[in-house]
Amino acid sequence: MNESLSHRGPDGDGFHIEPGVGFGHRRLSIIDLEGGRQPLYNEDHTVVVTYNGEIYNFKDVELELRARGHVFRTRCDTEVIVHAWEEWGERCLERFNGMFAFAIWDRNTETLFLARDRLGVKPLYYTGLPDGRLLFASELKALTACTDVSRRIDPTAVEDYFAFGYVPDPKTIYTDVHKLEPGHLIVARRGSKAVVPRRYWDIPLFGAAPPKSANDSAEAVAAALKKAVERRLVADVPLGAFLSGGIDSSAVVAMMREIGVDHLLTCSIGFNERQYDESRFARLVAEQKHTDHKVETVEASDYSLLDLLASIYDEPFADSSAIPTYRVCQLARKHVTVALSGDGGDENFIGYRRYKLFRMEERLRAPLPLAIRRPLFGALGRLYPKLDWAPRVLRAKTTFESLARCASEGYRHGVSIAPDATRRALFSRSFANDLQGYGAREVFARHLEGREFTDALRMVQYLDFKTYLPGDILTKVDRASMAHSLEVRVPFLDYQFVEQIASLPSNFKLRGGEAKYGLKKALEPYLPREVLYRRKMGFAVPLDVWFRGSLAQRLADVVNGDRLRDCGMFEPARLAKLVDEHQAHKRDHSATLWSLLMFDGFLRSLM
């Protein structure tokens, strides 16, 4: 199990074994290169920790613990965790600002304590076996290395995957294996088979701070971001940053330069296709900030990672930007061990294009009750053709279908990679029976139960923080970076920064047609307007081109192959129809077809 995670920690391994308890650890040396080996103990070896991540404020916590009489033997952040547990128990989590997944064994109380950071930057998987054993690990592959762990596929996870492109927390693709959700902990005592995760922190997207002027708020945002970046510069190894040319990564680089980082290395991926390529904007920022800038180009035919992705992600994962993410991590690791990224900026500042579309739909929903909208727009959605290849102004079918739903269901419909009707047609009758009426709508319903929001934009932000951010964005970056033994730190997901930004009103983040309005105002003194006020591109790959060209034969082989047919989940005729419609330019099924390729790769990995 430990060896399967050697890529996460190539600098050594360590074990703690005692009756009924076993800890393993793979080390990536970042702080206190000689003294920070794990598992790590308290003074009398009655408390032991195995841990992945960084506690950025560990020096402050250490000072507090020293004042209370604790003795430290190392300079690393890991030792803070064991002493904080001794001093405060579960409430030690309140002291930590960082990204982490860790396990503590306390021999005195025969207690196992598992915790995952507030935003879910670091992963933690667990499973309970029938004989009472509790297994946990940073990746699924470490658990499935144990032959006692069941690989029975969860039909509801498959439904979720084809809706969202990933398996949302707390599920995994396997029925009996779970993800510990962000901001959750588990306390397990010897002899008890009950494993009940408990929330210790939640995203405060419910209220607004007292109004400030836009300038005052912007200055506060800049100061808070600078502080979040500064916290993430503690390292005893080379450190750099991703620089895509977008606002978020450019903001992180600008703040690193403001703080005074001397030799600032930045890494960027470019594309041959101009409509996907942001490297010229990355170069503009790199030149202005005088960084040591490294660029590599991803060719239009760079789908050589197809077979590798299944082994990296362990379960179906359909975000095609995993390819350039893998490449930029590969590039960065040639030069540094730690890289800062701009992930989380869109979730904090309402940056995705879909937020603007959702706001437009909400303005249309507001005057009409659902009893009127459902039949009216439902009929329009059924009658209006799906014009994927037409100019955007003519593509109204999805909008009509969303308007026929309530706000949360409309948003889910808009973000689904395979809409409800497509999935119903895609799945076989026997698989539909296995679902027993379950639908992906229950993912959002679970997170919204018992919660109220001051406006609908806050609701969809909250949903993205709970689903898309940990399930897609952070999973993608963690696996791609750790495959290269690279640690990625995320200033926009500093929990104190997130709390501060959450308190700001929605119209500071999305004003008129300007997404990220407040962040752009905050960054005007630091970045060129050409970077701040250009159209958002995203980190995408040309799937539609691949599937009609260089990947056409591979796609046909997979869709008509034995694995998808024999697994019993799909209607073979419908699979073939998806390919035919895409190749004939009748529909753009590229997202669904990519998800099928990735699912096929997962099935192949099981053999």
Image (spheres, rainbow, N blue to C red):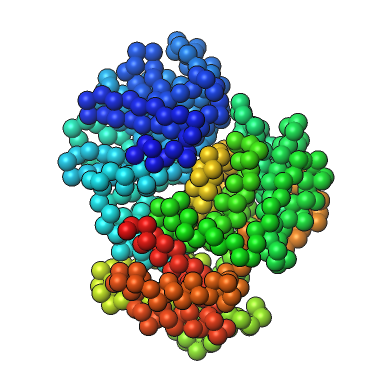
Which residue is at a point 81% across and 56% down the rendered structure image?
A: 530
Rendered position, 431 above or below 5: below
- In this view, 544 is above or below 256: below
Which residue is found at the position 49% from the left and 68% from the top?
A: 594
Q: Image check: 317 left or right of 190?
A: right
Vertical side of 180 occupied by 160: above or below:
below
Please tell me how many numbered marks the rendered image carries.
0
- Residue that sits furthest to the bottom in the current view: 383
Task: Compare residues 434 and 564 and report the one nearer the observer.
Answer: 564
Q: Horizontal placement of 256 versus 147: left or right?
A: right
Percent x, y for residue 302? 59, 61
Q: Residue at x 71, y 50 (%)?
A: 295
Q: Quadrant of the N terminus?
A: top left
Q: Quadrant of residue 183?
A: top left
Residue 508 can be seen in this image? no
The C terminus lies in quadrant: bottom left
Q: As rendered, which of 105 and 299 lies closer to the eye?
A: 299
Q: Position of residue 440 (x, y in %)?
A: 38, 65
Most foreground residue, 252 or 545: 545
Q: Position of residue 564 (x, y in %)?
A: 36, 71
Residue 580 visible in the current orientation: yes
Image point (54%, 56%), residue name: 322
Determine whether, in the image, residue 418 is placed left or right of residue 504.
left
Residue 53 placement (x, y as % from top left): 49, 34
